[in-house]
Image (cartoon, grey):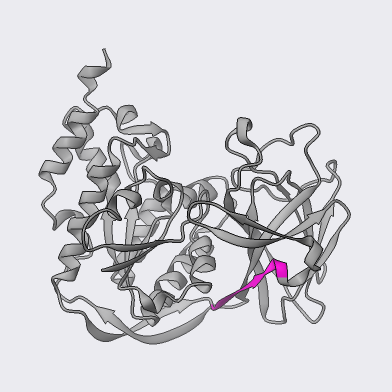
Amino acid sequence: MKLLVLGSSNAIGPYSFVDHLGRVPGFEITNRSIGASTSTAGIYALLAEDSSAFDYVLIDYEINEEGALQERLRTVEEASLSLRSLIFALRARDCTPLLTIVPTTHGRDRPSGAEKLYRKICREESVHVMSIADFYRRAFRRGGAWDRMLRDPFHMAVETTPIVAEAFARAFRVLEAVRATPREWTSRVVPMRAIPAADLVASDRRVRRASSHRSAWHAVLRRGDRLSIPVGSGERLVGLAINCGAPGAKVAFVANGARVVKRLVIYFDQARLDKFISVLVDLNQAMPGGPGGIDLEVLPANAEETERTLHQQSIVEGRYGEIEIEGFVIAASTPVLSRCIGVARPGVPCDLGGVIDSEDLVARLATLGARASLG
């Protein structure tokens, strides 16, 4: 079974549920997850991948989608179109998508707004869902401690990830037991394409960055630099993939009378500021292209920002003025109604959490995080 993973930080690392799932016999996994990002990152990763080589694709972006919606950095319409476009692109390549909802502190008592939105889209698009958050809620009702089952408000404790991996293994076996049949799918989507940033700069401004599961060339831009992004008429710039390990800077995107200034300073560990971590940054304000494309300029630190960046941090003294960009995501200005022939697994309910045998998994989660053990 060949599985492509398009997810966020819970899907990354040697102790993640994806790592454990890869050890289960019969699973061959390719992980293209990008942390701290919305579903735009899934489209970006997919554009560089031959996804037709995979049977299934696991999608995991609800956590950061919720953050973007809560901070008003992304509209419900944008989030919906992005996820629908990702699902449709996968089906057009004969892949079966499976969307997951992972647990967070904010989703302990009730589903988040993004979880509700994602579930609504999955019902309308007939996409299978596997909610690990539901398993955690059931374990909590059985005496499990939420802050023991999570290592922080947004990430599962490493002790629980083997259990989560087993849940996914059972879910995929349910899908695998039903013969895939072709059918027509119709959806309102936004065609997208990606531009590698390294193709837009001289060779001495390119640097290759690599981690345990990701490797890519980046364009290096410094304070005062300008870059022309070839975004044509009828298109708009929706996001860019950056390396958070670079010092960071404020940047302006300018085109056709529109100007957006964002702070691209993101880090997650002050003790390891230069660690290579990829993040897909969304642009909330529409940036239309045209004959002259869109200009990007690296600004001084005192430039006034026009919109926030998800996960943005304060500028570190003595560390400013250089960014590393992997690529840009370009979308059509208007959605289109598209049709494709893709596979379906008739008779399998959308919510796989109620189909697989999960009582033992929930009991193990509750035991690992038993509130009584907190003393």
Pick the residue in front: 185 or 1. 1
Is residue 325 visible in the rendered structure shown here? yes
Start-end of magenta stretch: 191-198
Main secondary structure of the magenta stretch: strand
Q: Nearer the viewer, residue 131 or 210?
A: 210
Return the x and y of residue 343 as percentages of the image width and height: 27, 81
Left or right placement of residue 234 versus residue 192 in this view: right
As drawn, is 117 to the left or to the right of 128?
Answer: right
Q: Is residue 143 above or below residue 101?
A: above
Q: Residue furthest right?
A: 224
Q: Position of residue 87 (x, y in %)?
A: 40, 71
351 with respect to 262 (left or right) = left
Figure quadrant of the C terminus: top left
Q: Quadrant of residue 14?
A: top left
Instruction: Please report the residue visible at 78 percent of the width from the left and 67 percent of the height from the top.
Output: 203
Residue drawn at point x = 39 percent, y = 57 percent: 117
Q: Quadrant of the N terminus?
A: bottom left
Image coords of residue 129 (percent x, y): 28, 60
Asked if residue 295 shows in the view, the reply is no
